[in-house]
Amino acid sequence: MAAARRRLSVGLGLAGLACALLGGCLLLAGPRIVRRQVIQNVRIDPNSISFQMWKDIPVPFYLTVYFFEVLNPKQVLRGEKPVLSQRGPYVYREYRFKTNITFYDNDTVSYLEYRHLFFQPDLSNGTEDEYIVVPNIMMMGAAVMMEKLPAFVKFLLSGALASLKQEAFMNRTVGEIMWGYDDPLIDAINLIVPGLLPFKGKFGLFMDFNNSNSGLFTVNTGVKNISQVHMVDSWNGMKMVNYWRSSQCNMINGTAGEMWPPFLSPTFLDFYSPDACRSMRLVYEQSGDFKGVPTYRFVAPKTLFANGTDYPPNEGFCPCMQSGILNVSTCRLNAPMFISHPHFYNADPSLVNAVEGLHPNKDQHGLFLDLHPMTGIPMNCSIKLQLNLYIKHVSGITQTGKIKPVVLPLLWFAESGSIEGSVLKQFYTNLVLLPSVLEYLQYTLLGLSVPLIISAAVLMAVRKEKCSLFWSSNKKSSDSNKTNQATSAKKLPPVKGTVLREARL
């Protein structure tokens, strides 16, 4: 029985030590193993898991477009406030893929990324054949651009506009506004002011958006330094752009807006947007999860499109108007174009009040990015921007009537996508489930080691106590016997010598 207890205590002790050792090893080595796997698989390397995802983005992206129809164009010409009605959405499935992928010895890779858009009638509220009344973008834009030119030039333009029957507002289909329409005004403007418009024939707001690339990006691969993966090294061969008035505003910061370096901190992230002609910074808002995958949400700060008065670092993006709109004329052929959040969300209230029909709110009009912080891969995103045209009465061009100066919304769009299906399942299994199993296993082993070692110690202590009691009992018995013998000896009478002698005889 004692031997069995001894074997049991030794077995429990060894099992406890084994659990403690294995749990300790997992505690120390587990995070390193996961980190090494992340580093190997998020860098831009043909052998990494994410390379194919980076090359041909498997995430279903959608471009959702809403137009602002002008309901009272005649009244606007008389100087009244524009009344707008939002139309749409008009939804397009967006496919992205990279070509001309070239790796260099300095740990960078260059590529061209193309976008193809396909109209989705089932997801849209309307068709591309629907007509919408919007400002005559070419005419009103050209009028503002020529405002400071000599009077005779504006007189020539006004005459050309009259002969071409051009008016301040036009009734065009969604497809024409998006993808282009033949406009004789373009050739007329180039004839009157050569070089004012560096294109001819067709004009459309998204004409250069479909079946085209966003420029030659050169980014870091992260093979030598994982903290630099996806960070832009140059765009179209430039380390800085030259659209703005300060070197800080002209800097190309962050990534190309598709992925970020792993092990993100909840602070901010930067990316360069060719569509906005500038780098943009989003700030951390909150932690959450997307279908079981932990995420950090980043949103646009109110200062993103603030003017230089309200936010001095943005002074380089001026000349500015109210806060909440960005003047992109310097990178849009000097046309009086502005970008903002949809419905002038986070903008100066005067912009919203200058028209009727806008209802800004965060849920519908705020942009966001939900990133997996361990890998820097977006799980869910929606980038929303609004295109606006500055229109006004221009002296000498009669077609502008008495229009009061106003930044008029033309449309807003959202590029949205989220990881789903087999890609989400693989992502969840490899980067969430397995690390979680390892984490739980290490704490389970460490937790088991404590009761096992305690049990072994208790059994050992009990065994020692029993042994101690046994030897103590034996010792007391022995001492008692000796005492009894001594007492008996004292009670015996003394033996006399005569008796001994008689016995010998």
Image: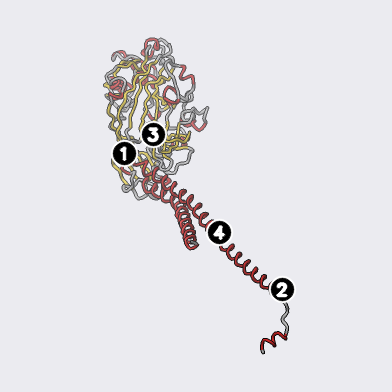
Q: How many labels sit on residues?
A: 4
Under circle 2, the secondary element is: helix
For label 2, the residue is 491
User: How far is the residue under mark 2 from the one under mark 1?
Assistant: 101 Å
Q: Amino acid at mark 2?
A: Lys
For label 1, the residue is 422
Q: Are marks 4 and 1 in contact (CB under 8 Å)?
A: no
Q: Horizontal placement of 428 versus 352: left or right?
A: left
Residue 225 seen: no
Where is the C terminus found, in terms of image quarters? bottom right
Q: Earlier in the sequence, mark 2 or mark 3?
A: 3
Q: Choose between 333 and 305: the one closer to the eye.
A: 305
User: Disc number at residue 380?
Assistant: 3
Q: Residues within 10 Å of mark 2 (few under 14, many from 20)?
A: few
Based on the displayed image, in which of its 4 quarters is residue 497 positioned? bottom right
Q: Residues within 10 Å of mark 3 (few under 14, many from 20)?
A: many
Q: Position of residue 419 (x, y in %)?
A: 35, 36
Q: Position of residue 183 (x, y in %)?
A: 28, 20
User: Disc number at residue 461?
Assistant: 4
* Mark 2 or 1, closer to the camera: 2
* Mark 2 or 3, closer to the camera: 2
Q: Earlier in the sequence, mark 4 or mark 1?
A: 1
